[in-house]
Structures are given as structure tokens and as C-alpha cells.
Image (cartoon, grey):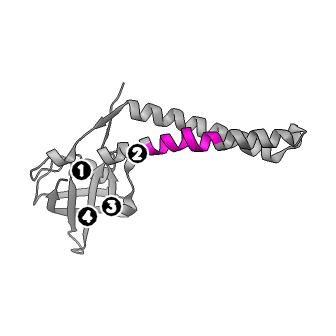
């Protein structure tokens, strides 16, 4: 069984979503199905069919979250240090063409949100960065062509 790397915050977020689905959403959809059944003929009851679809989605997501959580390999970023890029590092990169700087934290795939600066450990840029050190240059092939970045800062925690 393949372990899934994630931060403590990422695990907590998934566990909260699971609790909400199990103890709030699941109960709400059961009530919605019961109400829709009271309206009679189920074959033409749009509310009933929508509630059943929602129930199916909830049960599928609950199963998915339980699987992810059971395989989670939590990495405590606070205990990490150094100038080598690895999982959990917050990396400041300078675009070598424009000198624009961007900051990304390398996290697990299930907690990635590029708009918030959290990049999946499986992304092409993260894979290029892993193992590199402060001051190194990395080249990444992007949809718009090849880009070069210099690692100008590496932080943990």
C-alpha cells in the first residue's frame, strides 16, 4: 500500500472534511431523501433523485477520504531544517529571465492549492526542486516553454 505524504495541517483538513461529510452532510441527505419519499411517486420525483445523487457523492467521497487518511504519511515540517529542498520546504524562486520572485511550499497532492502557494510534491517544478540547494538553478519545461529559476531561499516550518 503506497503511503501518501502530507503535512499535519493537510491531514487535519482532510479529517475535518470527513467528519463534516459523515456527521452533517450524511444526516442532511438522509432527511432530504425521507422528505422526498413523502411526496409520492419516486419515478418522477426530482428532489428524490437529486438527494440520492448527493448521497452517492457523499458516500464516494467518504470512502476516498478514509482511504487517503489510512495511507497518510505525516511529515512534521517543524522538525526539518537546512538549505536542501525537500517535502515541506517553503522555497523562494527567482525567474532568471524576469527576476520575478515566487514562493511555494511543497506539500502533498491532496493539500495542494497553487493559488495559495501550496505546490504538489508530484508537480514538475517540485520534482525538479527536490534535492537541490540554496543558490542552485533549476530548469523546468512548462507549457509556454522552458523556464529557469534560481533558488533564493529555503525555509521549513
Whole-Å distance between the Cαs marked 4 and 2? 19 Å
Relative image position of residue 148 (x, y in whole percent)? 22, 63
**Mark 2 Cα shell of 10 Å, populated few (<14), some (14-19), many (≥20):** some
Location of mark 2 (residue): 110
Quick one: label 1 or label 3, which is nearer the N terminus?
3
Residue at image coords 65%, 37%: 56
In the depicted structure, whether residue 108 falls above or below residue 98? above
Location of mark 1 (residue): 128
Relative image position of residue 140 (x, y in whole percent)? 27, 56
Whether 26 is among the magenta residues is yes
Quick one: label 4 or label 3, which is nearer the N terminus?
4
In the depicted structure, whether residue 130 falls above or below residue 102? above
Quick one: label 4 or label 2, which is nearer the N terminus?
4
Location of mark 4 (residue): 103
Nearer the observer, 81 or 25: 25
Whole-Å distance between the Cαs marked 3 and 2? 14 Å
Eye-nearest disc, 1 or 2: 2
Q: Are marks 4 and 3 in contact (CB under 8 Å)?
A: yes
Location of mark 3 (residue): 117
Q: Quadrant of the N terminus?
A: top left
Magenta segment, which residues? 16-27
Indicate left or right for 40 with 67 as reference: right
Whole-Å distance between the Cαs marked 1 and 2? 19 Å
**Mark 3 Cα shell of 10 Å, populated few (<14), some (14-19), many (≥20):** some
Q: Determine which of the numbered discs, if any, sits on residue 93 in the image.
A: none
Amino acid at each position: 500500500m503506497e503511503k501518501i505524504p502530507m503535512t499535519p495541517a493537510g491531514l487535519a483538513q482532510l479529517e475535518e472534511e470527513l467528519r463534516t461529510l459523515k456527521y452533517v452532510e450524511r444526516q442532511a441527505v438522509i432527511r432530504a431523501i425521507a422528505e422526498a419519499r413523502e411526496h409520492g411517486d419516486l419515478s418522477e420525483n426530482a428532489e428524490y433523485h437529486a438527494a440520492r445523487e448527493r448521497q452517492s457523492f457523499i458516500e464516494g467521497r467518504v470512502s476516498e477520504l478514509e482511504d487517503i487518511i489510512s495511507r497518510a504519511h505525516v511529515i512534521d515540517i517543524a522538525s526539518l531544517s537546512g538549505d536542501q529542498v525537500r517535502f515541506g520546504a517553503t522555497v523562494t524562486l527567482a525567474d532568471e529571465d524576469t527576476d520575478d520572485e515566487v514562493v511555494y511550499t511543497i506539500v502533498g497532492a491532496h493539500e495542494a492549492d497553487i493559488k495559495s502557494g501550496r505546490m504538489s510534491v508530484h508537480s514538475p517544478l517540485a520534482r525538479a526542486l527536490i534535492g537541490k540547494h540554496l543558490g542552485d538553478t533549476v530548469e523546468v519545461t512548462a507549457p509556454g516553454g522552458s523556464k529557469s529559476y534560481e533558488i533564493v531561499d529555503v525555509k521549513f516550518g
